[in-house]
């Protein structure tokens, strides 16, 4: 079993920055891809950014150039640096992890979510 715990959400003005963190515990050696999804009210949950154990990253088009995903040296933490935030980035952000695969399209584990609110 793997547990994912997020931190770092909050309220920020448009144009500001936030950094999300996620720490994995448990059977972390089986985790390959980690990353972030988000879900705004009335919308489906969408993949924001993912990173493989080897450091390969992918981003949603809507956040390219503004968000940066990274992984700690121990590979059990993942970060999302969010710059130039816009009101449409407002959502609950979920940390996600996938066993064995470098593709985060179908996560095996989810965090509890952290709220990010961007005011205009």
Image: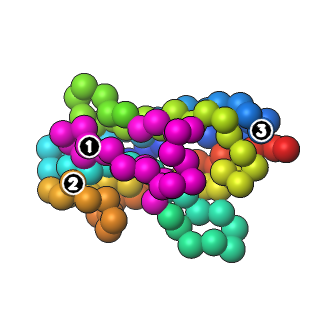
- For the residues labelled 3 and 1, the Cα–Cα distance comes to 29 Å
Query: Residue at the location (46% across, 36% down)?
Result: 68
Tell me the crowding category of disc 1: few under 14, some 14 to 19, or many 20 or more residues within 10 angstroms, Cα based.
few
The residue where tag 2 is placed is 102
- For the residues labelled 2 and 1, the Cα–Cα distance comes to 8 Å
- For the residues labelled 2 and 3, the Cα–Cα distance comes to 33 Å
Tell me the crowding category of disc 2: few under 14, some 14 to 19, or many 20 or more residues within 10 angstroms, Cα based.
many
The residue where tag 1 is placed is 56
Q: Which range of residues does the magenta coloring cover?
A: 47-69
Tell which circle, 2 or 1, labels the residue nearer the N-terminal end: 1
Residue 98 shown left or right of residue 40 in the figure: left
The count of marks equals 3
Tell which circle, 2 or 3, labels the residue nearer the N-terminal end: 3
Q: Pointer 2 and pointer 1: residues touching (CB < 8 Å)?
A: yes
Residue 55 shown left or right of residue 61 in the figure: left
Query: Which secondary structure, mark 2?
Result: loop
In the displayed structure, 21 sits above or below 3; it is above
The residue where tag 3 is placed is 14
Query: Residue at the location (75% across, 49% down)?
Result: 87
Residue 86: x and y, percent? Answer: 72, 45
């Amino acid at each position: 079993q793997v547990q994912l715990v997020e931190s770092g959400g909050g309220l920020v003005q448009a144009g500001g920055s936030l950094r999300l963190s996620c720490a994995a515990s448990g059977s972390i050696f089986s985790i390959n891809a980690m990353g972030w999804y988000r879900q705004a009210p009335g919308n489906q949950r969408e993949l924001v950014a993912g990173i493989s154990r080897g450091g390969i990253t992918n981003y949603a088009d809507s956040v390219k150039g503004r968000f940066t995903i990274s992984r700690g040296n121990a590979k059990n933490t993942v970060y999302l640096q969010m710059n130039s935030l816009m009101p449409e980035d407002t959502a609950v952000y979920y940390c996600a992890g996938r066993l064995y695969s470098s593709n985060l399209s179908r996560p095996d584990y989810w965090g509890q979510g952290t709220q990010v609110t961007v005011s205009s």
